[in-house]
Amino acid sequence: MGGLGPTEDDITREVCAEVLGRKLIFDEAAFVRIEERFRRRGRPMPVSNKKQAFVIENAAVLENQNGTAPGMWLTAGGARIALLPGPPPELRPMFEEAVWPGLELLHKGTTARRILKITGLTESDVENRISGLYPDQKNRRLTILASPGQIELHLTAFSQAHPAEAERAVERLAQDLRARLGDNIFSVSGEDLEAVVGRLLGKRKETLATAESCSGGLLAERITKIPGSSEYYLEGFITYSNRAKNSRLGVSWDVLNTFGAVSSETAEAMAAGCREKTGADYALAITGIAGPSGATLEKPVGLVYTALAREGGAEVQKNLFPGKREQVKFQSSQGALDMLRRALGPSEKAESERNGA
Amino acid sequence: MGGLGPTEDDITREVCAEVLGRKLIFDEAAFVRIEERFRRRGRPMPVSNKKQAFVIENAAVLENQNGTAPGMWLTAGGARIALLPGPPPELRPMFEEAVWPGLELLHKGTTARRILKITGLTESDVENRISGLYPDQKNRRLTILASPGQIELHLTAFSQAHPAEAERAVERLAQDLRARLGDNIFSVSGEDLEAVVGRLLGKRKETLATAESCSGGLLAERITKIPGSSEYYLEGFITYSNRAKNSRLGVSWDVLNTFGAVSSETAEAMAAGCREKTGADYALAITGIAGPSGATLEKPVGLVYTALAREGGAEVQKNLFPGKREQVKFQSSQGALDMLRRALGPSEKAESERNGA
């Protein structure tokens, strides 16, 4: 993987050909595709890109939909060799579409997988709840991946017999885990929290707006990562200064001066003001201290208030998030999204949707 | 690295002790630090965390400032073994402070490094400009790392003689590259673009506000990644809908209807309106089509207008960014930040600052 680019230090193609004792052959079709890619962007093809059109003798050329470097797939000395571009957006689709299907033919047996994603609990909380559920058989595995604000449980089951057997085994384990962890699990299909929230909003045809202080736009950024989010996301405010909190969201100077920018009262007023100004069905607000500076004795780094306003009123959560600035920002956005998820009702896809995903 | 956590699948400690034939010993001081960490967060220590206080016989305990798992440093069979926690925020400082200094004693010779960061050019552009500068000696190396919106040149020079010799060699190479690449280089010290812009704004005591459509908050998120950004960053608008562009930023319905939301005119009006509403010295605006949907024949995915408003007027750039939604968002934020960087003047730190960094 990598080293198929146009630069002088991209030498995978040449080294591989030399080691195998094969020639590099100019591939007209590959060359046309590279030229065409530059033409679509309205730029001339630099001379250096020409070398990307040379392929190893007897290799199958893999078209690159997302970049200039074609991949190659060849057999030599009883082994299969794949040459793939390094950048993940080019590598992943090529691997999944052209390489993986060819490899699966070589496997015997089936591995079934589930990823459960959890928020609102620490790694130790999760561990204590699921202790005793670790599989004792070699062909079932459970791994915990923890980061601040999100715990993932990766489940696999392997079977040499029927694919359905592996599927049943992993599903049994998943069911046991779900019984222990309840609605702290926000996804059983690998979805991120912003995708779950987006799917639920889309289904209910409801709209969302955001008002952020310490998270500085991360909440909006995550929401708008989801293709089609413009259907339900109306707009966002990043009210870093008190003046902005007052003038954009209508948080009163009285509240700001009495309770401070980092307070339950300000968070609630931000959410309520955001909902009123935008007309969204739901408004999320975040205010807190991301650090490293800005802390006081009463208000330490990591103190964050998240608020949700909806028809009928607003609710606020007080959090004390561990970690540095970046982690505090992430957990703030995660906490706010999770308030909305829980307000929107059951987050799991129906069985039929899950199987279709 | 990893496997030192409190859960049942964290077995590094136990496996390592067993392989070395050493005992695990309860370390009172480590235990007190773990308990103290939970107390500071106002939560009881789960029983499962107790096992993190057991350390391998004859190992030096490495304090973990950023998590519960202590590290260990030991010698066995002529080798040095370090057991380190997996999460990067815990791993990095412990490695840098406790492990790396011990390893450097084992090295002979010195490696000097530079990272040049570049934007506004493609990988092929960079390659064509610097061709011929690839070092032909074994002890100097130049590597290109390219991603959409940013190219990094990693330079190293190794010397067995004086550290100053390695430093001079890498600096000569850096100078040659700077002569070819000019002000497309935004950092020679590893800084991200948002850090460079923040440093320049801070030095000039000027302020910034942002108005984003297709980048959806990513620009604000990057700006507020920088500790202390509240000194110069006033606020941001994420005006996803046309209604928000009109009501928050004063973009006229006439402009929106005549030219469309994705147009040079709208970008300019967003930046100018944002500057006026917030009173910031500079306002950046972004509007475009991040994809995968929303494209038309005239306005393809990746078409993005970035605008900068400042005293005296506004400028707009039209871009056609390659890649998927996430890459288009990143390049949009990068393009906007780079317009501001170039407007703020020379971005390099003075020699004295660089050496102190």
Image (spheres, coloured by chain):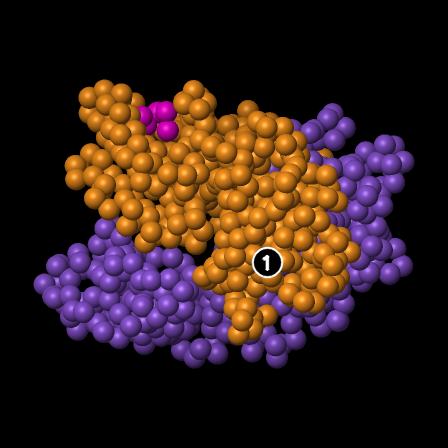
Chain colours: A orange, B purple
> Few, some or many C-alpha atoms within 10 Å of disc 1 (few <14, some 14-19, many ≥20)?
many
> Which amino acid type corresponds to the residue marked 1 in the rendered image?
Ser
**Percent position (x, y) of residue A354?**
43, 25
- Helix or strand or loop: what does disc 1 sit on? helix
Main SS of residues in magenta: helix
Residue A235, image quadrant:
top right
Which residue is painted at 53% across and 62% down in the image?
A303
Which residue is painted at 51% across and 49% down in the image?
A335
Residue B171 makes an appearance in the image: no
Which residue is painted at 17% across and 58% down in the image?
B14
The outermost residue toward the left is B21
**Percent position (x, y) of residue B268?**
83, 47
Which residue is painted at 43% across and 70% down in the image?
B111
Residue B311 makes an appearance in the image: yes
* Left or right: B275 as drawn, with respect to B346: right
Which quadrant of the figure contains the C terminus of chain A?
Answer: top left
**Front residue (pair B277, B322):** B277
* Left or right: B5 as drawn, with respect to A50: left
Which quadrant of the figure contains the N terminus of chain A?
Answer: top left
**Percent position (x, y) of residue A202?**
59, 29
**Front residue (pair B54, A257):** A257
Question: Chain under label 1?
Answer: A
Q: Magenta part of the protein: which range?
A: A100-104
Indicate whether A132 appears above or below A346: below
Residue under numbered circle 1? A264
**Percent position (x, y) of residue A60?**
42, 25
Indicate whether B342 appears above or below B334: below
Residue A260 is a magenta residue: no
* Left or right: A264 as drawn, with respect to B248: left
